[in-house]
Each structure stands twice: as structure tokens, then as C-alpha cells.
Image (tube, helix red, strand yellow):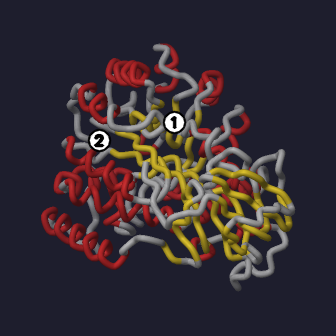
């Protein structure tokens, strides 16, 4: 879904950049060219001869695959930063109990549109939108419309029935309706899961996903004692509900034998280090997952309590793991944020690395910015010092959607004004302040 920007020529040559490919067969090129033909990568080499191509001068730039965010609740964008001090219980009450009931489809649309544009501006070319503001079908339609209009590849993870209280509605008709509107790789089913519903409901959801050919994503973590007396992954394994199309969100505090069950079934995991640390889920499980044979991906989670860029996410996860055991390298975390994220979404044959035949989903980072200059180790610089301000250009399937630091074809002032109106309306209806002075209850 969603791929818009400037009209692109048949052939584009990105010339002379420092290429960080994330493809072992290509490696890193201190100076290299990337040829784009018809939206795909046609050649990667130290020098590519393409006399008839439009040339993008990448000298002084790092050329790398766009980031892949595998779990973001994009609809919450209007309340960015309001929950910096919230606990997990406060977040649940605030976003799902206090604010969500006042969301109208227009609010969902604006949150998703601005959130997706923000992600793109910071270099996220592929994003899984974990949508659970699903109180009415029109909300889902609005979310999907925004993703279609925004530049970038987007996967709609429909969490129908998630976070809506104790009732367990029959979600099959609604999931089937939306499934018919989206491409095969454009939708994932967000499970209510064994910690938010009965195991029978979880089994029914997985059966529905398999019938419709959908991957599934499910939240599992140790916040506020959710796992006390429960073995959710073992319960799912015993019911035959785990497979290589299952992604677990977070996974903090899961016992070693259950992590092994995930690995044995070929499951993937997405880690959101900032939210997991601030909300008390436990240490991000990057190292434990790797030790079990699971390549994790990275995600933002929610913008009310965390920043929305992958640079900070990589840096937090990297620093934590180095502090815990000194293991892993900067390159591991760039892989988690690119090719491993694509694999989590089932899109690794299409994106995630600078590889011939894949979509030309590329970002160019300014290596001459004073905050990173001089660049000797591009991969180390990306993780240790990278930030959204470095993102000079973004290409999605070969189409330029950001050039020279400016988004193309987006009226940001108008969208900002509409999002502010949306936030003020919701906050007024809910009777809360957005300046950080409101402390949500915990239940």
C-alpha cells in the first residue's frame, strides 16, 4: 500500500555513495553506484555504466536500505509525548479507556497519515501498522486510506477486538471484509492473544488467519504481572498455533523453554526497546532471542511514550545489550532494523537490503553533517550517532519521496493544522490536558 512521490524515470543511477548493503554477497562499498530500473535495483558495484540514466549524486552520503518498522500503533500519533512518564497500566487506561472512545474515523485517518509520513521522513520505507483503534469498521477503513495515501510500503495489522474490554466479538466477518481489499502481503491479523482473551478465541483467530492466508502478530510480555501463572507460548504450542508466520511483540520475561518453542516453530519477534524499558516490561530480549536462533526485528511501538525514529531505537537496543553482556555489534542492529525486519513481515524477497532484483527502497544519509563528520565506519556511525536529521533522500520502489531533506508532494502545514484540531477535539471530549499535567489512573 501507499507509494507516492515524484515521477521517476525508468533508470536512475545513485552514484558515488558509501554503500551499506546489508547483503553479504554485496558487502559494503566505500564508494559505489546503485542502478535503479523500473523501481528495482538493477546493479550494485564500485562503478556502474548507465549513460542514459538520471544521476543522483551520492558523494558525501551513506546509501543503505530503508528501515523496516515491524510494530507501530500509528493511530496514536496526535498524542506524541503525552505519555513519557506513564506506566504501562496508565498507557492502557489513557489510550484505550479514556481517549480511544472519542476517536472518529477522521482522527484515525490523520494519525495514521501523519504518523506514516513521519516514519518515512526518518527513513522508514516499510512499516507494519499495528492497528487496534478498531471500535467500528469505518475506523479501519480510515486507517487503510491513510496508509494508501502516504508514501512508503505499509502493512496493515488489524487488531480487531484488541483492547476493547472483556467481550470477545466474532471478528471473522470484519477481518474477511478488509482482507478482500488488500494485497496478499499488505495485511496481518493482530491477535487478541492468550493474555487478552481466552485460548479458544486465540485458536479461532489463528484458524481465521490461516484460512485467509494471513500472518499473525501477538503481544506477549511481562508487564504488570501478565505472565503470573501463565505460559502463553506453551499454551499456543500445545494447541498447534505456532508457525513461521507468527510474530511475537516484545517477548520480555518469557521462560527459556518457551523461547525455544518459538524458535522451533520458526516464529519471529519484534523488540521495542524504549517502550519496554520505560514501561517496565523488562530488559529487551535481543540477546536471548539470538541465542535461541531467532533473528529479532525492531519497532517503535507507540509515540505517546517513545520517539518515532529507528536510529534511537537501534541505539537503545545496542546500548542495553552491550551493557548486559558486551555482545553483538552495530552491524547486528542495522540488520535487525532492515533485512530482519523485512523477514519478520514476510517481505525479505522484496526489500530490506541493497540487492539486485529487490525494490529500490533506499535512503541517503548526509555523511558530511557536523554531527557525524568525518565518517570512517558507516555502520558504526549509523547506530552510534545517527538521527533523522541525516536523512537527505528516500526512495520507495525507485520513486523519490524525499530529496535534499524535503518531503515531496506532501502539504505538511495543512496536515499539521488538521492533526492539532483532531488532538484538541479528542482531549476536550475526554476532559484531559495534553501538556503532561494529566496523570492517568492505573485501572
Q: Within the image, what quadrant is residue 227 found in?
A: top left
Q: Residue furthest bottom?
A: 370
Q: Residue at x 23, y 25 (%)?
A: 170
Q: Provide residue 193's location: percent of width, then percent of height.
A: 39, 30
In the image, is 353 to the left or to the right of 3? right
Residue 334 percent across, percent down from the top left: 69, 55
Where residue 366 appears, x then y in whole percent? 68, 76
Q: Residue at x 19, y 64 (%)?
A: 426
Q: Is residue 317 left or right of residue 429?
A: right
Does 175 sit above or below residue 333?
A: above
Q: Quadrant of residue 433?
A: bottom left
Q: Is residue 89 visible?
A: yes
Q: In the rendering, at what x and y percent does residue 215 appear?
A: 48, 31
For label 2, the residue is: 163
Q: Secondary structure at mark 1?
A: strand
Q: Secondary structure at mark 2?
A: loop
Residue furthest toward the top?
Answer: 239
Give left or right: position of 171 versus 287: left
Between 47 and 290, the one lying in front of the other is: 47
Question: In percent of the image, x 40 and y 71: which residue is there?
Answer: 410
Identify the disc placed on residue 248: 1
311 in relation to 228, above or below: below
Q: Residues under labels 1 and 2: Cα distance?
A: 17 Å
Amino acid at each position: 500500500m501507499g507509494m507516492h512521490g515524484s515521477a521517476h524515470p525508468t533508470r536512475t543511477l545513485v552514484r558515488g555513495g558509501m554503500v551499506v548493503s546489508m547483503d553479504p554477497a554485496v558487502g559494503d562499498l566505500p564508494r559505489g553506484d546503485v542502478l535503479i530500473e523500473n523501481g528495482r535495483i538493477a546493479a550494485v558495484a564500485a562503478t556502474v555504466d548507465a549513460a542514459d540514466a538520471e544521476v543522483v549524486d551520492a558523494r558525501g552520503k551513506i546509501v543503505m536500505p530503508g528501515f523496516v518498522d515491524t510494530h507501530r500503533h500509528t493511530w496514536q500519533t496526535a498524542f506524541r509525548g503525552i505519555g513519557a512518564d506513564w506506566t504501562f497500566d496508565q498507557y492502557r487506561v489513557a489510550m484505550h479507556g479514556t481517549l480511544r472512545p472519542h476517536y472518529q474515523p477522521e482522527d484515525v485517518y490523520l494519525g495514521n497519515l501523519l504518523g506514516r509520513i513521519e516514519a518515512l521522513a526518518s527513513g522508514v520505507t516499510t512499516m507494519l501498522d499495528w492497528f487496534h483503534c478498531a471500535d467500528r469498521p469505518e475506523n479501519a477503513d480510515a486507517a487503510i486510506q491513510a496508509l494508501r495515501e502516504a508514501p512508503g510500503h505499509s502493512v496493515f495489522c488489524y487488531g480487531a477486538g484488541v483492547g476493547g474490554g472483556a467481550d470477545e466479538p466474532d471478528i471473522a466477518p470484519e477481518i474477511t471484509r478488509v482482507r478482500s481489499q488488500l494485497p496478499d502481503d499488505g495485511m496481518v491479523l493482530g491477535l487478541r492473544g492468550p493474555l487478552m482473551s481466552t485460548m479458544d478465541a486465540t485458536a479461532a483467530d489463528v484458524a481465521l488467519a490461516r484460512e485467509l492466508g494471513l500472518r499473525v502478530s501477538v503481544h506477549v510480555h511481562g508487564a504488570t504481572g501478565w505472565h503470573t501463572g501463565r505460559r502463553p507460548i506453551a499454551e499456543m504450542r500445545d494447541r498447534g498455533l505456532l508457525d513461521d508466520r507468527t510474530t511475537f511483540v516484545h517477548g520480555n520475561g518469557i521462560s527459556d523453554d518457551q523461547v525455544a518453542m518459538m524458535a522451533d516453530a520458526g516464529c519471529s519477534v519484534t523488540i521495542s526497546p524504549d517502550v519496554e524499558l520505560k514501561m517496565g516490561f523488562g530488559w529487551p530480549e535481543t540477546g536471548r532471542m539470538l541465542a535461541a536462533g531467532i533473528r529479532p526485528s525492531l519497532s517503535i511501538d507507540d509515540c505517546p511514550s517513545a520517539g518515532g525514529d529507528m536510529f534511537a531505537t537501534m541505539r537503545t537496543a545496542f546500548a542495553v545489550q552491550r551493557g548486559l553482556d558486551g555482545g553483538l555489534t552495530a552491524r547486528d542492529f542495522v540488520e535487525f532494523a532492515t533485512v530482519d525486519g523485512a523477514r519478520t513481515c514476510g517481505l525479505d524477497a522484496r526489500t530490506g537490503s541493497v540487492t539486485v532484483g529487490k525494490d529500490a527502497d533506499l535512503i541517503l544519509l548526509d555523511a558530511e553533517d557536523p554531527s557525524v563528520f568525518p565518517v570512517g565506519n558507516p555502520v558504526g556511525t549509523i547506530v552510534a550517532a545517527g538521527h533523522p536529521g541525516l536523512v537527505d533522500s528516500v526512495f520507495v520502489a525507485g520513486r523519490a519521496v524525499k530529496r535534499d531533506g524535503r518531503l515531496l508532494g506532501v502539504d505538511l502545514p495543512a496536515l499539521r493544522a488538521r492533526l492539532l484540531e483532531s488532538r484538541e477535539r479528542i482531549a476536550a471530549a475526554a476532559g484531559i490536558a495534553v501538556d503532561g499535567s494529566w496523570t492517568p489512573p492505573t485501572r
